[in-house]
Amino acid sequence: MTIIIDDAGSGDLLFGMVIGAYRKETGEFKYDVVDVKYFKPPLFRRKEYLKETSRIVLQLLEKLKVRENEEIMLCRGYIFDKAVEDLKKLYGEDRIKRIKVSGTPQRYVETAYLDELRNLGYEPIEQRENARAKNFFHMLKWLKRNPDKIKYAKTGWPRLSRYRLFKNQRRRESLS
């Protein structure tokens, strides 16, 4: 048996991040969300999202009731570095692998993330994975039209201060 863990949304401007766990042999799928607050000051600067990702991964594995000797494969992305470290301590080095996730598990996690975005009232662009810059500016324009939704933006990235929309927001978040 094998459980595959992937993420979606970590590099997007909107929402937090979805972490999904998929059991290959049975098709079971569970997911949870790293809240957007982990991508805002001061938590973002302290990389608290890595600890939260690890906590969620452990929780998802508990929900799936990891079986003895079941292999756990995680996406290669740095977002899982702390989780991998924690999982190796818990399950042993041999059972934990880093992989490039594709196919069904990736599709499930991506779909869960897109559903969460739609719940905000945002309609993602088609082919968003192949158009990172276009995706960013589409989200930015949506936020400008919906300033009440800025609370769902990842404002921890220093370069965002170039945009008027985020200058005051970052200042307010740094003070809180």
Image (cartoon, rainbow, N blue to C red):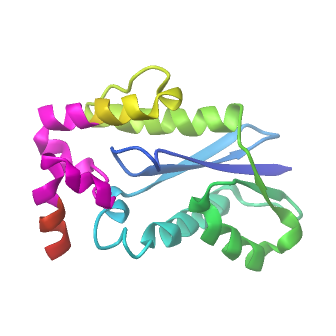
70 or 100, which lies in front?
A: 100
Q: Nearer the viewer, residue 6 or 61?
A: 6
At x 83% / y 75%, what residue is drawn?
A: 92
Q: Is residue 47 left or right of residue 22?
A: left
Give the vertical position of 96 relative to 152 (above or below). Answer: below
In the rendered structure, which segment of residues is drawn in magenta? 140-169
Quadrant occupied by the C terminus = bottom left
Q: Is residue 176 visible?
A: no
Q: Residue furthest bottom?
A: 89
The one nearer the camera, 10 or 29, is 10
Q: Which is more toward the observer, 125 or 31?
A: 125
Q: Quadrant of residue 94?
A: bottom right
Q: Is residue 163 magenta?
A: yes
Assign the magenta stretch its main secondary structure. helix
Q: Is residue 58 visible?
A: yes
Please give the name of the residue rendered at 14% of the width and 36% of the height, measured from the top-left corner.
Answer: 144
Q: Is residue 46 above or below residue 129?
A: below
Q: Is residue 72 left or right of residue 12?
A: right
Whether the magenta-drawn stretch holds residue 151 is answered as yes
x%, y% of residue 139? 29, 35
Identify the residue at horizontal 48%, vertical 68% (top origin).
52
**Residue located at (34% from left, 56% from top):** 36
Query: Dividing the picture into quarters, in which one does residue 57 lie?
Result: bottom right
Residue 55: x and y in percent read: 54, 69
Residue 47 sits above or below residue 36 on the image:
below
Q: Say whether residue 92 is left or right of residue 44.
A: right
